[in-house]
Amino acid sequence: MSKHLTLVALASSPITLQLNAALIAHSKILGIEITKETKEQSHSKYFTARWTCSEALLPEARVALRDIAAAHDTDLAFLSPGFNPDAVKVLAMDMDSTLINIECIDEVADFTGKKTAVSEITEATMRGEIKDFKESLRRRVALLEGVSADVLDSVYRERLRPNPGATELLAGANARGLYTLLVSGGFTFFTQKLQQEFGFKQTQANTLEIIDGKLTGKVIGNIVDGAAKDTYLEQACNLIGCQKINSITMGDGSNDLPMMHGSGISIAYKAKPIVKEKADAAFDRVGLDAALLLIA
């Protein structure tokens, strides 16, 4: 457990001495001092290096340091003072564009020729431009009225793929005994299949209404939005007797921010700028399984 802020560089190739020099030089410009902890470490797929910083960093400073790391083909994470990796008990993650490579609703819409209309709403919502996720989802699902339910299976079989490192991440999390939660603003048709594939302890998502083999354009029950994601995470923590600070969270869109805020480590995976800015870690070059190195 460190008493200082820890910077962790993660990369798929050896971390250069030039990155170390650039981070230290810019830190001096910011009026802070960072100290390299150890030599670079090589893991099965990734390379890491760590620095300690005795002061908190403003959001602008984090962005600047991440930009420097990006110029050296490296991702950067910030671990809070007092963070204890052994205390992490829960892994909670988003599905669409985080665990998997697609936005499922956009691909379902593609089978009807309405992908552009649906994806425009999806993108604006994930960027945080449309604030009401529930209304956004209702508008998008309404465009799917009359679509054959068979399309859902076609999307799963033909287009849905796990993002890099997903299999290794879940295998590592399950081996460690973490309570794994897949919480999505997407649909139960997909989360239930992914639960079977990856062994999630719990999944939460929205249920599409299907009558006579066709989508009605409606969602059954309460919609899982950002607030609901946070609530499900809190409930999972209560279930196993820990607090939200004992969780690691992963997402890519603005509706993931409520559950990410206050977790032990929040990871933005190939995320929208608003999410990267607020997350402890931003993964753009390493896979999902690099998260295991932050809690090793």
Image (spheres, helix red, strand yellow):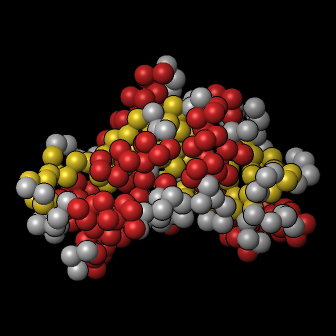
Between 247 and 102, the residue placed more toward the observer is: 102
Q: Is residue 31 left or right of residue 178?
A: right
Image location (x, y in percent) of residue 4: 76, 40
Looking at the image, which residue is at 38% across and 40% down? 203
Q: Quadrant of the C terminus?
A: top right
Can the viewer see residue 290 in this picture? Answer: yes
Report the residue that reaches farthest toward the top.
241
Q: Is residue 21 above or below residue 81?
A: below
Q: Quadrant of the N terminus?
A: top right
Between 5 and 228, the residue placed more toward the observer is: 228
Looking at the image, which residue is at 42% across and 53% down? 95
Can the viewer see residue 131 in this picture? Answer: no
Image location (x, y in percent) of residue 260: 48, 45
Q: Is residue 112 left or right of residue 4?
A: left
Q: Is residue 144 above or below residue 201?
A: below
Q: Is residue 105 left or right of residue 243?
A: left
Image location (x, y in percent) of residue 42: 85, 53
Between 206 and 153, the residue placed more toward the observer is: 153
Looking at the image, which residue is at 47% across and 59% down? 100
> Can you tell which quarter of the image residue 70 is in?
bottom right
Looking at the image, which residue is at 39% across and 62% down? 157
Image location (x, y in percent) of residue 133: 27, 56
